[in-house]
Amino acid sequence: MTREHADAGVTISRRLALQSTGWALGALWLPRLARAQSSGGNDPGFDRFAREWGELAEEMLSESQPDEDRYVYRLSAMIAALGVERLPSRPRDTYANEGMRSGPSYGAGDNFLVEFELEPGAVIRAHNHVGYDFVSVGAKGECHYRHFEPLGTPPPISGGLHEPFELRESRRGILTAGRFSTLTRVRDGIHWFQAGENGATFFDFGTNLKKPGDGWTEFSVMEFDPEPIDREQGIYEGQWIGNPYK
Ligand SMILES: [Fe+2]
């Protein structure tokens, strides 16, 4: 099932399009994009970037202990060199609700690109990413972001929903055109977004480091008390609530 189809200047394999149905936040429930082939339309600059991104990911994934920081920062530099204005828009929405519209605009191998378009003030609720590296880059407008890390081992999502646990805010900032935020499997793995008063568009560059058989049940939205337990240290109390983005 790899029949190619073209839509809005972006070619995405039928396999990818089918797998992405119901996909809101970027491969949260998406099995490995095994050999899905797609390209960013007719822009040779993006095509070259995509090839180099694939090579960079393959190199990182071939390492027994991948240096994921080196990977996301090298990828960020490649995106900056390309220019965010050359990133392909999503051909269609695979999710549209609560002021957020999103969909994949590129995918090949373990790499995928998702575009998010948020109405003014719209929120993407805090959620985790287990087994992925992500680079988020702003394209239009302004989007606030926050990242968190659990303190210690959080409750398991399967069987541990609504159990309170402590987490630390590890970074916050704004995405505007060309500004970045990143996360890896070992840091900043929970993130939250809110568009500014004029709305925002940003892109997530994801790379799947999961191995077949790792399972797909670890995704959850995290609710947290906006009042910190410890303001100086940025400690909050949160709980997994499951996946309302299904
Ligand atoms: Fe995310």
Image (spheres, rainbow, N blue to C red):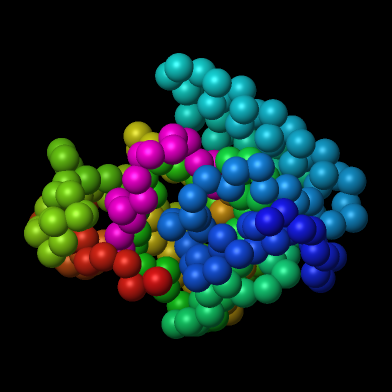
**Horizontal side, residue 219 vs residue 104: left or right:** left
Quarter of the image where one finds residue 132: top left
Q: Residue 220: x and y, percent? A: 30, 60
Quarter occupied by the C terminus: bottom left
**Horizontal side, residue 233 vs residue 148: left or right:** left
Q: Residue 167: x and y, percent? A: 20, 49
Residue at left 76%, top 36%? 51
Identify whether 97 is placed above or below 91. below
Q: Is residue 95 visible?
A: yes
Identify whether 19 is placed above or below 218. below
Q: Chief secondary structure of the magenta span?
A: loop
Residue 70 forms part of the magenta stretch: no
Q: Is residue 118 visible?
A: no
Q: Residue 151: x and y, percent? A: 17, 42
Residue at left 21%, top 54%? 157
Looking at the image, which is closer to me, 54 or 179?
A: 54
Looking at the image, which is closer to me, 90 or 141?
A: 90
Quarter of the image where one finds residue 91: bottom right
Q: Start and end of the magenta stretch?
A: 206-221
Q: How many marks?
A: 0
**Horizontal side, residue 89 vs residue 169: left or right:** right
Residue at left 69%, top 29%? 55
**Horizontal side, residue 131 vs residue 111: left or right:** left
